[in-house]
């Protein structure tokens, strides 16, 4: 599992003799996805409901954490639970590119993709020198979405010790009651959930890239379409 050493700006717990240092988890509710799946919307709403989410300065790390925290690497608090959002990866990446987050996103996802010789993601952490054409020219999953999905949806509960609710963005509004029960929210709180908005489709260049994205992510998109709208693992 890939671990980002910048996870928390707090002192790590003191290790017991012969045991590894554990990374402390300082929140009990976490929203994670491979991007472009309504993560920010859901996180903002949960913050309004008073959920114990990651702190603002660390939220981006937990938001796209490459794999679930496990008991051998993390100090996991009692009551910890994760909402893992999934969606059509083609639509998700079009959303990421549309908002100009693609360079930052590739770094945050800790992708292990093979990049062109001499290209370092660290040289472009915020401002994109690459657009969607350059990413697609690599003809591979530059964002590590396949691995991210596998890591989160096939992890073993015994290694974690906490539940993960896998929730599909496209059908999330059909499962608000179950999501609220999972998080211990009141019915009145769930009733204030934001209404669904259609994804924006205005950028002609991005829409023209759709066939290439479908060539790279089509199999995964089909797998996610067949995945249950909600599943607790």
Image: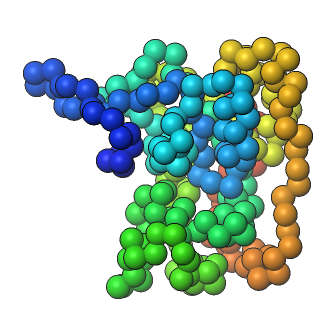
In which quadrant is the N terminus drawn? top left
Q: Is residue 215 above or below residue 197?
A: below
Q: Is residue 10 above or below residue 98?
A: above
User: Percent from the top left, x then y, of residue 202?
Assistant: 86, 73
Residue 203, by quadrant, is bottom right
User: Percent from the top left, x then y, of residue 71?
Assistant: 35, 26
In which quadrant is the C terminus drawn? top right
Q: Please indicate whether residue 96 sits to the left or right of residue 57 in the image.
A: right
- Between 216 and 171, the one lying in front of the other is 171
User: Percent from the top left, x then y, of residue 190?
Assistant: 82, 24
- Between 163 and 13, the one lying in front of the other is 13
Report the colour scheme.
rainbow
Count the labels in the image: 0
Q: Please indicate whether residue 49 sits to the left or right of residue 19 in the image.
A: right
Residue at 85% x, 38% y: name it. 194
> In the rendered image, is residue 222 in sight?
no
Residue at 75% x, 77% y: name it. 206
Residue at 42% x, 72% y: name it. 121
Residue with the most extreme left position: 17
Q: Is residue 145 above or below residue 38?
A: below
Residue at 73% x, 44% y: name it. 41
> In the rendered image, is residue 23 in sight?
yes
Residue 173, by quadrant, is top right
């Amino acid at each position: 599992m890939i671990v980002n050493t910048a996870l928390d700006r707090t002192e790590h717990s003191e290790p017991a003799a012969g045991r590894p240092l554990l990374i402390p988890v300082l929140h009990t509710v976490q929203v994670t996805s491979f991007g472009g799946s309504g993560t920010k919307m859901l996180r903002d709403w949960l913050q309004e409901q008073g959920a114990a989410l990651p702190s603002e300065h660390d939220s981006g790390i937990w938001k796209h954490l490459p794999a679930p925290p496990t008991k051998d690497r993390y100090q996991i608090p009692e009551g910890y639970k994760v909402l893992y959002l999934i969606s059509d990866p083609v639509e998700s990446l079009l959303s990421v590119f549309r908002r100009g987050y693609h360079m930052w996103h590739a770094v945050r996802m800790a992708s292990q993709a093979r990049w062109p010789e001499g290209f370092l993601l660290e040289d472009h952490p915020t401002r994109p020198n690459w657009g969607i054409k350059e990413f697609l020219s690599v003809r591979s999953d530059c964002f590590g979405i396949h691995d991210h999905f596998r890591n989160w949806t096939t992890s073993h509960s015994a290694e974690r010790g906490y539940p993960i609710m896998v929730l599909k963005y496209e059908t999330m509004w059909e499962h608000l009651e179950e999501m609220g029960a999972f998080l211990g929210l009141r019915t009145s709180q769930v009733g204030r959930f934001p209404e669904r908005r259609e994804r924006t489709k205005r950028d002609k260049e991005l829409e023209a890239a759709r066939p290439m994205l479908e060539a790279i992510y089509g199999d995964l998109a089909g797998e996610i379409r067949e995945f249950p709208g909600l599943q607790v693992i």
